[in-house]
Amino acid sequence: MESRKNTEGGAGHSVQPVAAGTQHTGVSAGILNAGTLIVQQGAPAAEGGAVAGPRCDIPVLYARPFIGRVDLLNTIAETLDDPQRPSVVALHGTPGVGKTELAHEYARRHAGRYPAGCFTLDAGGDTPVKLAEIGRLIFGSEPFRDLSMVDQCKVAFYRLTRSAVLLVYDNVRSAEAIRPWLPPHGTPCHVIMTSVLDPWDGLCPAFAVELLDRDDSVALVASIAGEDACRDGDLPLVDWAGGLPVQLVPTAAALKCARRRGRAGAAKLRLEPETQNSFRPVYELLPPDPRLILQTAALRNGMALTAEDLQQDMADATGWDEENFDRHLDACLDLHLLESGGETLRMHQLIAHFLREQPAPDGHGETLARIRQAQWRRLVDSAKAFATAPNRMELAAKMQGFLTDPTLWDGCGVTGSALDYQTAGRAFSETGQFGIAQLWAERSVHAVEQEATEKGVDHQSLGVSLNQIGTCLFDQGRFADAQPWFEKAVDAKQKGDIHQRIDHESLGVSLHQIGTCLYRQDCFAEAQPWFERAVDATQKGDIHQRIDHQSLGVSLHQIGDCLYRQGRFADARPWFEKAVDAMQKGDIHQRIDHQGLGVSLHQIGNCLFKQGRFVDAQPWLEKAVDAKQKGDIHQRINHESLGVSLHGIGNCLYRQGRFAKAQPWFEKAVNAARKGDIHQRIDHQSLGTSLHEIGICLSRQGRFADALPWFEKAVDATQKGDIHQRINHQSLSISLEAVGHCLSQLGREEEAQQWFERAQGLEPG
C-alpha cells in the first residue's frame, strides 16, 4: 500500500515532523588488459555489519602505468577526506575523455581506505541495480530476503552509507535521479560519479576532465605501441584522435599490431579526415569473424559483458567451437575494441554506437540477423522470468546484460510483440528503471495498435500498456503527467478485450491510480470520487469474477484517507472500517497483508483520537499493533510503522492524564523505532518524538531528574533528522527547552540557560 505511507498521524505523535567546477588536464591510459582488483580478505568489517570478506571489481592496469592527472587525483582525495564537504564528487567531460578510468585509478590508489570494497555501478537509469548485488556480497543474503529489487537496493544503500566503501557511479544521466542514492555528509561511504552533465548546480564538488594535450597523447601512444613508434615525432594518429583516449588506445594498439608487419602494415591505418571521430580505421583491420563478435557485443550492456554470454548468443547461428570463438575474441581484445576486466568484458558506449551503425560483416548478414533475434528472445525470456520473481538478483542481472533502450533494438532490425514490450517494461519497472520502463511501455502501445486484427484493437491490452506509462511517470514523482495516461487506460479498458470482456479488477487499478495522482498533489476532494469508482469496479472482479479484497480494501482506505485529510474524521471512520473488513478476507489467494490491515486499524483509532475520544481510540490502536506485529504477506515487520501505533497508545493514555501508564508504551515505541522500517532505515525524528514523550510523562509526575536524560536522548536523535536527514528545528527546539526546564527545576539555572540559548539560536523551519 505505497500510497499510504504518510497517513499515520494523529494519535501517533504529538510533536509532528515537518518535511523539510574546477578544470584539470591530464592523461588517462584507458583500461589496458585489465583484470579485477581483489582486496585482501580479512580486512576490517564494515560498520554496517559486513559478514563477507571485502572485494573490489575495479580493473587492474597490471604493468601499464597510469599517465598524468596526478593533480586531479589529489584533489579528489582531498575533497573526499574533508569532513566538512560532501562524501561525493562528480567527474564530467566529453564522452571518451577518460572519466571512468580516472575514477578507477583513484580506487586503485586508495583501496586501503575502503576495507568494505570499491565497486563500479552503471548509474544510467533511475536505480543503481548493482547495489543489491554489492549488498549481498558484503552483508550476506538475509537482510534482503523477500524484498523487491528496489527495496533490496534501498537496504543495501542504507547499510553501505555506514560502511567504508567506494562506489563509482558510472554514466550518470540525471542529477535528480541519482540524488536519492548519494550518501549524506560525513559518512564513511564515498561516491565518485562520472557524467557528461555540467553543471551540477551545487549538488556536490564537480571537476572537469579535459581532453589530452599533445605531449600526454604521445606518452599514451608510446605506452601502448612502444617508444619506437614515437621517435620521429610524426604521429598523425595523435592529431587525428583529438585528445580522446577512447580513440587513442585502440588506434595505438592497431599501430602496434601493424608495425609488427612492417611499415606497409602500418600504412594500412586509414587516418583520413573523413574517418575522424570514428573507429573505422581500427575496425577495418579485423576480418569478418571478429567483427561479428563486436556487433554481437554492441547489443549488450557494455558494462556487464561476459565471454560466456557472447558465446551463447552466437552458438546456434555460427556453430563455432570454443577454440574458434576464443581466437576471434582475442583479435578484438588485441585492438582494445573490447577490454578485458578479469571475469568481465567492457565495451565503451562510443564504440558500441559506432558498431550498431555498421553493416553486417561480409558474408554474415543472415548470421547476424539470427544472432540478434536470439539475443532478443534471451532478453524477453529473462524479463519474463524476473517479472515473476522480482526479488532474484541473478535474474535481474541477466536482463540488465542487454541494451535497455527499445529504439536501439528497432534500429538493428529487431522487433517483438506487444506482450514482449509489456513484459520487458514491467520487469525494468521492478528494478526501479522507471524511465527505461516507460520507453518499453510506449513501444508496447504502438505494437498493440499494429497488431490489431479484423476484430479490432485489443483495448484491454492497450489499457495495460497505457497504465504502464502512467505508472512509470508516477514512480518518477511526475503525478500530474501520469494522470492523463491513467485516464486513457480507463477509457481503453472500459471497451474490453477483443471479445468485449471487461476486466473490472484491472479497470479498478487504473481508476485508483487517477485518485492517487490527485491525492499526491494534495487534491483530496478531487481524488475521492476516483477511489469510489475504483471500489465499484473492483467489487465486480476480474474476467473470472474473482474479487481481490486486499485491492478493494486499499481503495476503501483511500476514500477514508481523503476525508481524513480534509478534517472530516467522523465521515472517514466508516470507510476505514470497511477497508478493515475487506482486507481481512485477503487477496485472490486469501493472503492477508497484516501490515496494511494494521494501517487501516490505526486510522480508525486516529479518527477517534482526533475527535477527542481517547478511550475509544486506544483499543483500535492496540489492534493495529497486533496486526503489524504479524508483518506483511512476506512476514516482514515494519518496526517504524509499529512504533507509530505503540506511540499512539501512549498518547491516548497521556491525554487521559495517565502518565505512568503511558510511559511504557512510549518506551516500546522507542524500541521499535530503533529497529527501523523494512529497509532498516531509522527515522531519528520519529525516535526523538517518542523519547521526548517519555521525558514528558516523567516530568508531569514531577520526576525531573529522571526525565532529564530522556530529553537529552530526544535532542541527540532529533538532531539526526528523519530518514532523509531533514531536521525538524521546531521539534528540536521543544526538546532543547525541555532539557532546560528540567535543569531549572533542579536548581541548575546556569546550565539551563545554555540549553534555552541553544533553542533560541535555532533557525526556524
Image (cartoon, grey):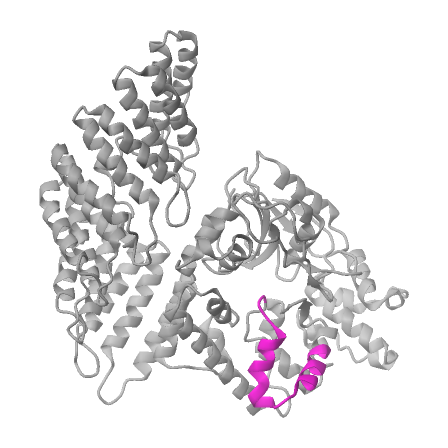
Residue 518: % across, % down: 23, 53
**Is 144 included in the stretch rendered in magenta?**
no
The quadrant of the image that shows the N terminus is bottom left
Q: Is residue 255 left or right of residue 573?
A: right
Identify the residue at image location x=11%, y=34%.
613
Residue 97: % across, % down: 66, 59
Picture layout, residue 713 above or below residue 41: above
Picture layout, residue 712 above or below residue 525: above
Identify the residue at image location x=73%, y=45%.
71
Identify the residue at image location x=39%, y=8%.
749
Q: Is residue 38 left or right of residue 5?
A: right
> Residue 86 occupies which quadrant of the picture?
top right
Magenta stretch, overall SS: helix
Q: Is residue 17 visible?
A: no
The answer to which of 257 and 446 lies nearer the viewer is: 257
Picture layout, residue 310 above or below residue 101: below
Q: Is residue 493 visible?
A: yes
Residue 238: % across, % down: 77, 65
The answer to which of 672 and 426 lies nearer the viewer is: 672
Residue 487: % across, % down: 22, 64
Where are the magenta residues, as a range?
A: 303-331
The quadrant of the image that shows the C terminus is top left
Identify the residue at image location x=65%, y=50%.
42
The answer to which of 154 and 507 lies nearer the viewer is: 154
**Is 329 included in the stretch rendered in magenta?**
yes
